[in-house]
Structure formats: structure tokens, C-alpha cells
Image: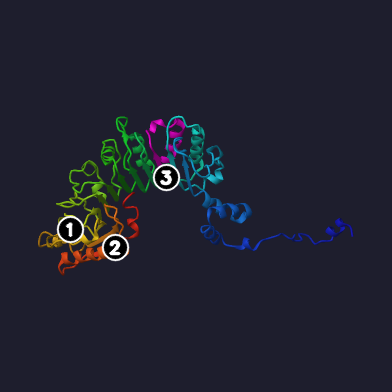
């Protein structure tokens, strides 16, 4: 029978056979769950082999992107060379998957790939979906090419940005920082080792900052001056504040005295090298519910704990002291009788009954480089618990814990 006759004899709308795969019946939620457990190499192969998995794999591959300048020429490069930025994808469909971006510029003048650096950032600013941004630099902001600065500022001021970390960005314009506080980053801002150009920020009316959580590390005086300026936006929306290398007496702190930050604080974290008498002294913080104090300690307990407990605000619900036990010689960790009372309040009132006081400790290597074995660490931990029990002398003792996940990076972050 001729072929055309055979086709003509078929009934109208005869269903043609279409090759399908059992994978096509998988729910998209299950497909997303599968790709989350795959390594990058497998994601690349699967994206090329399956149309069903292509977009979920691309979303995982491009979710976290880091763009770094090459290191200085004097540093020898080992291992495989990173791909050139001239090959950076510009497809809007791929760039829309970028949710977390890290930008690191390790050198300033004379970088031959600077145009490609600017082009990549401009493409991300136009089509990306960045929620988390980390900017790390080792030189003045003005050393970047104008196109690079413009692209970075476009990402910084995006209203969908939720978390921003800036590390060692020098001479950053304070006016741009005020703009991103009031119009850009919404949830968390981390400033570490940055400096700012304050003289250019004049005649501004920034309103109220959107940011809710503020973390300041290193160069605190620079950050205080920038945030306490009369040109800065109001910080009344900030509910969480973390200060590293901070003084324990915050009554005369410019950040608290010149802004509205203290009135809205719910959580406060202070990271100090030592905790000396008279302990932590806070400004009026009527809504403060959680106080966390992290401090180093040697084989003697730090002073100032008792006055802090006695002076807690009435709104406080939880107080956490985090001690790093840096023991040169574990066998010297035997507190004297006078130290047992350090955790007890100085007056008859004692710490507020509603406050749940919690002591957290971790054991680390000593200052002299002494390696602690498991038995030494256990002995130090037992001694620490014993001095706390004796310090409260039968009254309600605080909760004592050892090494929790939130302490990771306490030494270096």
C-alpha cells in the first residue's frame, strides 16, 4: 500500500507516538530536592544530559558566584588557572539564578582584565537576583575603574538586597553608605575594617534606615563616626547589634548617644578581649531582651560578671556569657576562694529572677602553644563547671554549656 494511502486511511486526529521518559512524571519539588545533593561536576553533566534537570541544575550552579581579581604577580600561582572573566556568561536566564555574590578585588592599578570585570558586574546588576552580597577589597574605593564602581553601586542599592558584608573597603563614600542604608540592604549589614569619606556627605535627608541587623568589626571608631553623623539615616529599625573589640562601658559610646539605636535594640552581642570591673555597663535600652558577652579568659576567671548580672535591665530575658578558655597549663586552673563569688551579685537583690543566665565555654590551645589532649580538655571543663557551682553556693546556678555551633569562628571572624 502506498504510504500516502496508508496515512489517508488513519482516523482523524490519530495520536502520534511520542517518546517520553519516566523522569518526566517527577514532581518539580522532587527534582529540586535531587539536585541539591549533587556535586558541581555532576550538576554540569546532568544539565547537559537532561532537559528536565537543566534549569534546576543551573539554579544550583549559579546560586553562589564569586568574582575575584587575580592575586599579585609576585605570588606564584599553583594549580589550575581560573577561567577568564571574558568568558563570564551574560545570558539573562543564567544570571537570574545568582542569589549570592562575592566580589573581591586584590589589586588596584594596571589590571589587564578590568573591562571584563566591569562587564561581568554590569550584567549581574542588570539581570541578577542578588540577595546576599560580600565586597572585599584591599585598597581605596576610588582606585576601582568608574564602570566597576557604577556596577557595584547598582547592586548595592538594589531594593531586593537583604544581606551585605563589606570587608577592608577603604575610603568608601559615606553618602553612598547612607543611600544603601535607606534604600538598599534590608536585613543584615556587616562592616569590617572599612573607612569612609565623611566630608562629601552634606545636605542629605536619608530618613530611616531599612537595615534590621548591624555587625561592626574592627575600625569601630570609623563606623561610629559614620553612623552617628547628622547626615546618616535614623537607625531606629535596628533590633540586633554586634560589636567586636568593643568597650564594655557603652554609656559614652557615640553610636548609642548620637543615634536612636539603643531604643529599638532587642539583641546585643559584645565581643571583648577582657572583661574587667565594673563589668558591662549599658545605656538605656528599654526593649533589650538578649545580651551576649564574649570574652577571652586565662586560667583565672574575668572580673566584672557579678556587677553585670546585678545591673541587667528589667526587660532582659536571656543573658549569655561566652568564655574562651585559653589555658597555658591545664593544671593551673584552680581558682582561689575569692574568685568563687565572682558570679554572685554584689547586693542582696541578686540578678533579676526572670533572666535565664547561660554560661558557654570552649577549650582552645594555650598561649604557649601547648596542645591539649582529650583528658586535659575534659579536666579543664570539669574545673570550669566546678567554679560556677561553688560561685553560686547553692542558689540557682546558670545553665552551663560547652562549645556550640554559634561559636564557630569566634577567634577569627
Question: What residue appears at the point 49 percent right and 47 percent down from the top-left corner?
Answer: 98
Q: Which tag, 3 or 2, sits closer to the chain's start?
A: 3
Q: Can residue 287 be seen in this view?
A: no
**Is 274 in front, or is 234?**
274
Determine crowd level at label 3: few under 14, some 14-19, many 20+ residues with C-alpha closer than 10 A.
many
Do the residues under discs 3 and 2 have CB atoms within 8 angstroms?
Answer: no
- How far apart marks 3 and 1 lie (CA) works out to 38 Å
Report the span colored magenta. Answer: 134-156
Callout 2 crowding tier (Cα within 10 Å): few <14, some 14–19, many ≥20 = some
- On the rendered structure, is 191 left or right of 276? right
Q: Nearer the viewer, residue 42 or 260?
A: 42
* Callout 1 secondary element: helix
Number of the label disc, if any, that sits on residue 309: 1
Visible residue check, residue 259: yes
The residue furthest right is: 1
Q: Mark 2 points at which residue?
A: 377
- The mark found on residue 133 in the picture is 3
* Disc 2/disc 1 C-alpha distance (Å): 28 Å
Amino acid at each position: 500500500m502506498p504510504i500516502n494511502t496508508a496515512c489517508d486511511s488513519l482516523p482523524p486526529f490519530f495520536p502520534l507516538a511520542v517518546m517520553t521518559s519516566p523522569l518526566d512524571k517527577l514532581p518539580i519539588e522532587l527534582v529540586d530536592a535531587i539536585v541539591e545533593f549533587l556535586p558541581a561536576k555532576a550538576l554540569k553533566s546532568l544539565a547537559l544530559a537532561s532537559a528536565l534537570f537543566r534549569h534546576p541544575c543551573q539554579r544550583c550552579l549559579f546560586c553562589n558566584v564569586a568574582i575575584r581579581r587575580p592575586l599579585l604577580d609576585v605570588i606564584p600561582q599553583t594549580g589550575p588557572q581560573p577561567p577568564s572573566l571574558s568568558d563570564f556568561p551574560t545570558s539573562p536566564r543564567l544570571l537570574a539564578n545568582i542569589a549570592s555574590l562575592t566580589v573581591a578585588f586584590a589589586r588596584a592599578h594596571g589590571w589587564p582584565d578590568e573591562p571584563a570585570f566591569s562587564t561581568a558586574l554590569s550584567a549581574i546588576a542588570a539581570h541578577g537576583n542578588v540577595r546576599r552580597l560580600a565586597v572585599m577589597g584591599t585598597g581605596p574605593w576610588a582606585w576601582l575603574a568608574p564602570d566597576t564602581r557604577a556596577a557595584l553601586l547598582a547592586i548595592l542599592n538594589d531594593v531586593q538586597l537583604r544581606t551585605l558584608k563589606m570587608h577592608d573597603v577603604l575610603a568608601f563614600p559615606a553618602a553612598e553608605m547612607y543611600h544603601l542604608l535607606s534604600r538598599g540592604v534590608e536585613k543584615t549589614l556587616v562592616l569590617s575594617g572599612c573607612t569612609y569619606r565623611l566630608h562629601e556627605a552634606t545636605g542629605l535627608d536619608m530618613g530611616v534606615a531599612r537595615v534590621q541587623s548591624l555587625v561592626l568589626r574592627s575600625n569601630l571608631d570609623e563606623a561610629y563616626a559614620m553612623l552617628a553623623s547628622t547626615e546618616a539615616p535614623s537607625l531606629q529599625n535596628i533590633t540586633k547589634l554586634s560589636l567586636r573589640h568593643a568597650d564594655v562601658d557603652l554609656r559614652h559610646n557615640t553610636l548609642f548617644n548620637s543615634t536612636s539605636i539603643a531604643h529599638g535594640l532587642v539583641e546585643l552581642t559584645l565581643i571583648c578581649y577582657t572583661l574587667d570591673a565594673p563589668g558591662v555597663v549599658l545605656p538605656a535600652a528599654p526593649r533589650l531582651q538578649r545580651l551576649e558577652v564574649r570574652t577571652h579568659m586565662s586560667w583565672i576567671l574575668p572580673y566584672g560578671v557579678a556587677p553585670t548580672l546585678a545591673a541587667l535591665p528589667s526587660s532582659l530575658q536571656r543573658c549569655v556569657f561566652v568564655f574562651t578558655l585559653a589555658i597555658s597549663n591545664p593544671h593551673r586552673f584552680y581558682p582561689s576562694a575569692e574568685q568563687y563569688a565572682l558570679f554572685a551579685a554584689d547586693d542582696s537583690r541578686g540578678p533579676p529572677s526572670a533572666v535565664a543566665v547561660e554560661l558557654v565555654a570552649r577549650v582552645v590551645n594555650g598561649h604557649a602553644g601547648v596542645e591539649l589532649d582529650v583528658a586535659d580538655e575534659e579536666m579543664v571543663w570539669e574545673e570550669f563547671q566546678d567554679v560556677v557551682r561553688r560561685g553560686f553556693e547553692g542558689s540557682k546556678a546558670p545553665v552551663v554549656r560547652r562549645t556550640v555551633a554559634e561559636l564557630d569562628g569566634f577567634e577569627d571572624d
